Amino acid sequence: MEATFWAFVPAIIAILLALITKQVYLSLFAGIFVGAMFLAKGNPIQALGELFTIMAEKLGGNATIVVFLVMLGILVILMTKSGGSSAYGEWASKKITSRKGALGATAALGCLIFVDDYFNCLTVGNVMRPLTDKYKVSRSKLAYLIDSTAAPICIIAPISSWAAAVSGELEGDGLIVFIKTIPLNLYALLTLAMVAVVCFTKFDFFKMKKNENIAMQTGDLLAGETDLPTEDAPNNVSSAKGKVMYLVAPIVFLIVACVASMIYVGYFYNWDTGHLGTELQSSNVIEAISNCDAGISLSIGSTLTVIFTMIFYAITKAVSFKEMMESIPQGFKSMVPAILILTLAWTLSGIMGAKGGALDAKGFVQAHITADSMAHGLFPAVFFVLAGLIAFATGTSWGTFGILIPISTAILGTEANALTLLTVSAILAGAVYGDHVSPISDTTILASSGAQCNHIDHVKTQLPYATMVAIIAFISYLACGFIANSASYGVIVLVTLAIGAVLFAATILVINYINKKNKKEVVEEATK
């Protein structure tokens, strides 16, 4: 089986089952078990032994990423209990005196809470809903803003649960590679640009425009509801009298602590021994950041942040000692689904041998696949579409890029060249798009619940906005893929961003023109 096409069968099975069953855990495990059966030559007991051996190796090698996720979960629970989010909402209601201000403040809070998409969805809606209701913002618009500043902001934040997940899938220094994908993640960047347009202009179309008109004219914020009810959002925002500083201080400290940890680890981490020593390993800050171990750095930074936050809350009496201790298991539990998906994705990668060994998918690709540059140029666009379809069907981004990143790096290699970075970026972008518009996505459900908007109405009103951005991203990836083989990373970034920005601006202008023309025709018809 080694270095043959059979190495890809586990991933193919995982993808097909995900599309059919929409169950990512079952699909990933099935693919893993089939691969283990190949390794064990059909012996199921031996296959289980191979499976758990590889799983243990992968989990052990990525233990620092797991630690970071757990610490992030604890931090989220602590910030929730402190009442900092509620304080932000109270502050905003006093300072903001316009509809645009309410929309902008909602988007700003969504961007501020970049460490985790679940925390984002469950916080922004509960905090900002009274303010947006005051200025007659439809619940579907609020749900769109929540959803569009959750996953899209997390996937371009170097210090987030998403960054940790993606870094664990990438060869070498995964965090540095992830950072290089940020300016190429067109879907996330253009989605945030769309949020800005929606907040500060009167740009709306299709069902969202209808809902907004009804809300502003009649005050019916639930316009467009279907018969399918939305379950109440869990009230994860503390009712305690908090302060905005309780939310801002831990996030600022997290950023500073993680960056400082990256620099420290880069200076003193010895890759040959695998330990932090006392001898300098880098000559400057830039080299230190490039040489750091992302998992260790993020683990140190997040642990220091949890310690700081507990001390800060204890001094200010924002959270009691008992609540702090309760936050530890609660934070761990909140990250169990993410850790499970990552563990299965890491094991699938190990079984396939996309990073060497096992069935050696990489060896097969290097020996047998000699696609020309034209075929390679299609990879970013093709992987973008494939990622979107899988994420839409399964409702998860993490499972999607956990499946596709090993395949893409097996085909293109793990060297961080322009084409590989563009393709990985396209996978991340497509996975976020599919997750964004999927009616079974956890973040989509949480966004509609947080806004107390009917879930199906949220999906219908959000779909045209997200799909417009996705089409622009697809065209940009298709155009740039053909020059990625011969261009540098910097050139690809500039060209990709330029094409995306031009197409985005042109699309906005065309839709605005159509809206104005339709409005003029309605007025003329009414005056006849």
Image (cartoon, rainbow, N blue to C red):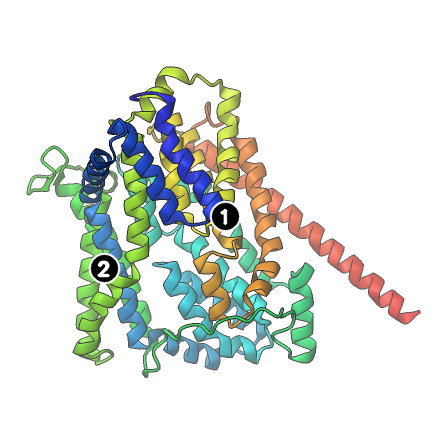
Task: Please give the name of the residue rendered at 51% of the width and 73% of the height, measured from the top-left corner.
Answer: 452
Where 465 falls versus 201 (above or below)? Answer: above
Quadrant of the rendering where the N terminus is positioned: top left
Q: Secondary structure at mark 1?
A: helix
- The residue identified by callout 2 is 71
Front residue of 346 and 139: 346
Q: Which mark is residue 383?
A: none
Mark closest to the chain's N terminus, 2 or 1: 2
- The residue identified by callout 1 is 393
Please tell me in which quadrant of the rendered image residue 284 appears.
top left
**Which of the two marks, 2 or 1, is nearer to us in this view?**
1
Where 402 falls versus 376 (above or below)? Answer: below
* Apparent side of residue 420 relative to residue 300 in the rendered image (left or right): right
Amino acid at circle 2: Met
Q: Secondary structure at mark 2?
A: helix
Q: Residues within 10 Å of mark 1 (few under 14, many from 20)?
A: many
Front residue of 483 and 30: 30
